Image (tube, helix red, strand yellow):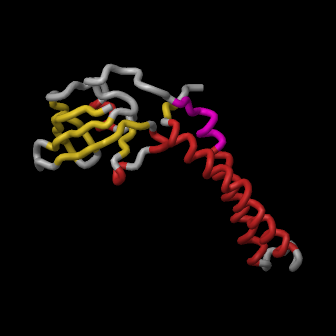
Amino acid sequence: MEKIPITRNGYRHLAAELLHLRRVVRPRVLEELQEARLFGIKADNQQYLLARENHSVLLRKIHDLETKLAQCEIFVGRKFTSKVVGFGTWTVVRNLETGETLRFQMVGPYESDVANGRLSILSPVGRSLMGRSEGDEVTVFTPAGERTYQVLEILS
């Protein structure tokens, strides 16, 4: 099984979400399911059918989080030199077409959130930026079209 890189905070977030689903949400869903069973297990008991569906959705979420956590490998400290874009580094780039300046932290796919400045190293832009130095220009073929970025600054 291939390991997926994740930061310590990202791992803690996933583990906390799993714990919440197991300790808070699952007992509530099971209680709803038991309550709905009191009216009988029939095809016309919509409350039971909805509770059963909610239970199966919850089990899928829990299984998905367990699988993600099993695949994760926490990266602690720097594995790259400080002047090269790598996992965990903060990178400031400029879109050369629009002039827009963006600041990203390079993270794993399970904790990616571009709106909050967390860019996956497996995304098209992330893959292109990995290993680049300050001043390098990168052309990326994204679903929205071709983009050209210049690496302005790399922060640890």
The answer to whether residue 149 is left or right of residue 9 is left
Relative to 144, is 99 on the left or the right? Answer: left
Q: Residue at x 62, y 49 (%)?
A: 16
Q: Is the N terminus in the top left, top right, bottom left or bottom right quadrant?
A: top right
Asked if residue 69 is among those painted magenta in the image, a careful observer would answer yes
Quadrant location of the C terminus?
top left
Image position of 148 with respect to 2: above or below: below
The image quarter containing residue 103 is top left
Q: Quadrant of residue 33?
A: bottom right
Measured as percent of width and height from the top left, residue 20 is found at 66, 55
Q: Front-most of 38 and 155?
A: 155
**Quadrant position of residue 106:** top left
Q: Position of residue 154 (x, y in %)?
A: 25, 32
Which residue sits at x=66%, y=58%?
57
Which residue lies at the image location 77% right of the left edge and 62% below the top edge? Answer: 27
Q: Is residue 80 left or right of residue 28?
A: left
Find residue 4 and report its horizontal and vertical position in percent: 51, 31
Residue 45 vs 112, above or below: the answer is below
Q: Position of residue 124 (x, y in %)?
A: 32, 37
Q: Which secondary structure class fits the magenta region best?
A: helix
Over which residues does the magenta segment extend?
66-74
- In the picture provided, is 85 more to the left or to the right than 1? left
Residue at position x 28%, y 33% from top? 155
Tally the marks. Answer: 0
